[in-house]
Amino acid sequence: MKRTTIIIIYLLLAVFALNAQDQQQMVTDCALSIAGNTTYLKDFVIKLPEKSNQDNIPVHKENIYLMKKQKYLFTQCNADDSNGELTIELYDANNLITGSINKKSGKVYSSVEFSCNKTGLYTIWYSFKDGKNGTGVGIVSLLK
Amino acid sequence: MKRIFYSLTIFLFLLLLYSCNNSTRKRAEFVFPESDSIPVNEAEKLSREAIDDIVQNIGSPVEMSALLLELDVPFIAEHLASVEQAENLSTNFQKALRLGIYGADLGYLNIYEKTGTAVETLSTINKLADGLRVGQFFDFETLKSLAINKSNIDSLLFLSVHSYNEIDKYLRENERGYLSALMISGVWLEAQYLACKIVDDYPHMDLKNRIGEQKIIINDLLMLLRPYNESSEEYRVLYNDFELLKREYSDVSITFTPGEPETVEKDGRLVVIQNEESNVVISDDILQKIIQKTEEIRSKIISL
């Protein structure tokens, strides 16, 4: 019994360690996939459960300062084993400015370019399309 | 059976070391609980959530430099902080502030692709990070190799900014927000200093406006520092200096013009143009006062 417990703890630790490593690799891969005409600023690793009901889609929110006369690129990458597709919505206070999902066609854009004309604190809402569970990374970069 | 457990233990220890760093980070350090963290009850008057709300990219090591490059301002090495006395810094307060300052300098160097000069700054950052026991997030050898070979500026920029983000995150998550706030303040101050030094010779309107826009950010920066304001004399002095700088901003006016965003699809990418605008009104007199105060604070920190 004691041995079994110890083995389970070891396995859990191993899973945790591998998971952390995978996440770091995912961030690096995603950030470098858009390198060239962008300068990396921030990354957010997003892991969300499946929605509990239609009105309760899990959201991960991040606040970020955006500066006037800068072009930002919001890029979303999904983990290989992610069920959901990572999407963003950008808010200025409570006003939705844009989102990466076309509500009519359902098309998800993996990148959103934002020409900022108002310096201030914005909120990025990360969620997975249709409220599925998933893992992904959002990268915020400057467009050169 | 014992042998299996020993093997498993060694394997897991190595795996944890590997995974606690990213693929290119140093592997050799393990960080134990810190003695320099301030007790939560004493200092963490803001909730972690509130601090997280404030903290994202207040002090970006590259955004101001990217603007300078975009405005065709030449690289001016003399504005960089000297790395000569960095090894003599004795307190974590000084080290964390300098870590921020050199982070902004590194961003400036990298954005302008002055990677040969960056090696010295990288080396200093590495020592400071080790001194603060966050060296595991700073892969000096890889960064140095990228800088020397000038082979991949994108990777160099990514790795250096990402290292700072990870250090900041680690400090905040491990109740060392005291040091994170200092590092962020250092990054912000140095970026502000570079802009102030350059705007005199290159009085571009966008640069003046960017300095004026810092009025929005300095309030949050003060909020970030406030919980630790009374923790030490040097912290109190820094906080008061930033408070004085904020006062210089009191006559800077920021207005907003409403407008609806336009969205188009271009090359498979969604392109959004914001038509709501922020407008900065800053007189030359006020700008000079802000420049003077910024230089004064930065000079005080550099002479520590």
Image (cartoon, helix red, strand yellow):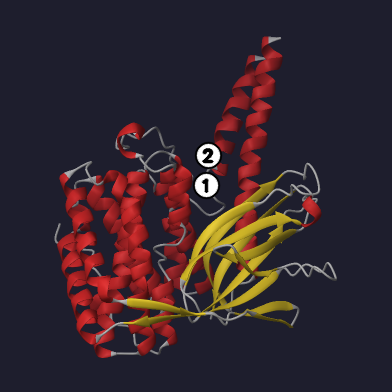
Between residue B2 and residue B269, name the one nearer to us: B269
Q: Residue furthest top?
A: A1
Q: How many numbered dots are placed on residues in this image? A: 2
Q: Amino acid at mark 2?
A: Leu
Q: Is residue B21 above or below residue A3?
A: below
Q: Is residue B110 in view from this perspective?
A: yes
**Position of B99 compared to B78: left or right?**
right
Q: Which residue is located at x 46 percent, y 42 percent?
A: B173
Disc 2 designates what residue? B17
Q: Pointer 1 indicates a residue of which chain?
A: B
From the top left corner, tell me how far across and down residue B119 is, in percent: 35, 67
Q: Which residue, given by chain and number where applicable, does mark 1 sit on?
A: B21
Figure quadrant of residue B61: bottom left
Q: Depth check: A98 or B39 in front?
A: A98
Question: Are the residues tagged 2 and 1 within 8 Å (C-beta)?
Answer: yes
Who's the residue at 45% across and 43% down the image? B48
Q: Residues within 10 Å of mark 1 (few under 14, many from 20)?
A: many
